[in-house]
Amino acid sequence: MSVQPPVIDQFINYLRFERHFSQYTARCYGADLRQYAEYLGQDQPSEPVALGLTSIPSSFEPVATQEPDVQQKMIGADTASVRQFLTHLDSFGYSPATTARKIATLRSFYKWMLKLEMVVSNPMVLIRTPKQTKTLPKAMTVDQVDKLLGIPNCQDTLGSRDRAILETLYSTGVRVSELVALCRNDLDQGEQTMRVRGKGKKERIVPLGSHALAAIRHYMVMLEPDPRFKALREQSLTDQNIPLFINKNGGRLSSRSVRRKLDKYLKMADLDISISPHTLRHSFATHLLDNGADLRSVQELLGHQSLSTTQIYTHLSSMRMRVAYDHAHPRAS
């Protein structure tokens, strides 16, 4: 038995520290490559690594493979080898989206190796990504958003925090990972803006609506006299680089905690439990376009690198306009 091929660790470090991928995304890439290495290193590979959040290792500890020369097999693989691996994946019934992600992992991996001259050719050049069914993002109606935002108890410190969180998600369209990374010094109350650190550690300034700003101010007022957060108040006297949204122990709130809080309020509001923090981001973009915002501005607000990523919201907005037209126009049908 030998440890995980060092080239995988090198690639993951490249993603984390040069490309600034999130730890979770890098772990997904690592899991895909370990599965690929296992396939190349064994005549009869075992059940592949599951890629659910709870099944991905929390660190990049080397894992055992059966062949000492598996790294050389990865370096020497040709297009036929990759196609054989993809055929092997078919036997496990992966969805086209999952297969496409694994292909994307291998494409990035071999592109990186080619750049470092570790391989003389890229075996992924002739590999095509399977077609996927395009699904439009779900968006809430304005009435549904209003109903949700009215649920948290603002007379309680943590309830006021939850109201501020929901208001901020809808007001700015930030990702939940961006939300929990916010610090107090990212908030500019005078300019009514927030500094957001997005994917690849790219920063952007986003406007903050008056309702969201009022909710944040109320939350901070409620936080001030609460005896549970005395240590946090003392820290804030000398350090503004502390979390904006905290948990009940005064530490930084996690993305998973935000999801749990949202689930609770969705049930209380009798709304669709499948709504996620990202649905609020979709709703933010859709409602802007519904009310005349231009696509380029929405792209910048969302922090999308490519305009094509933002364009999917135009389809959703068009669908909503069609529904409104069919419902309201006397000669629509």
Image (spheres, grey):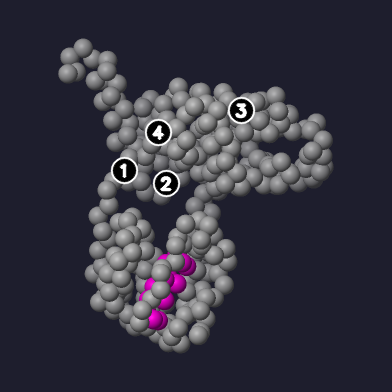
Q: Which-is-in-front pick, marks 4 and 2?
A: 4
**On screen, residue 98 above or below 255:** below
- Residue 164 occupies which quadrant of the picture? top right
Q: Give the Cα distance between marks 3 and 1.
A: 31 Å
Local secondary structure at mark 1: loop
Crowd rating for badge 2 (residues with CA inside 10 Å; few <14, some 14–19, many 20+): some
Q: Amino acid at mark 4?
A: Ala
Determine contact: label 2, label 3, CB under 8 Å. no
Q: Which-is-in-front pick, marks 2 and 3?
A: 3
Residue 86 seen in render: no
Q: Give the Cα distance between marks 2 and 3.
A: 30 Å
Q: Say which residue label 2 marks.
A: 304
Q: Say which residue label 3 marks.
A: 152
Question: Outermost residue toward the top?
Answer: 330
Determine contact: label 4, label 3, CB under 8 Å. no
Q: Amino acid at mark 3?
A: Pro
Magenta range is: 29-42
Instruction: In the rendered structure, find residue 135 and report the number of the disc placed on it.
Output: 1
Local secondary structure at mark 3: loop
Q: Position of residue 174 (x, y in %)?
A: 51, 41
Q: Which-is-in-front pick, marks 2 and 1?
A: 1
Mark 1 or mark 3, which is nearer the start of the sequence? 1
- Residue 310 occupies which quadrant of the picture? top left
Which of the pair 217/259 is nearer the observer? 259
Instruction: In the rendered structure, find residue 139 and report the number of the disc placed on it.
Output: 4
Q: Give the Cα distance between marks 4 and 2.
A: 18 Å
Mark 3 or mark 2, which is nearer the start of the sequence? 3
Local secondary structure at mark 2: loop
Q: Amino acid at mark 1?
A: Thr
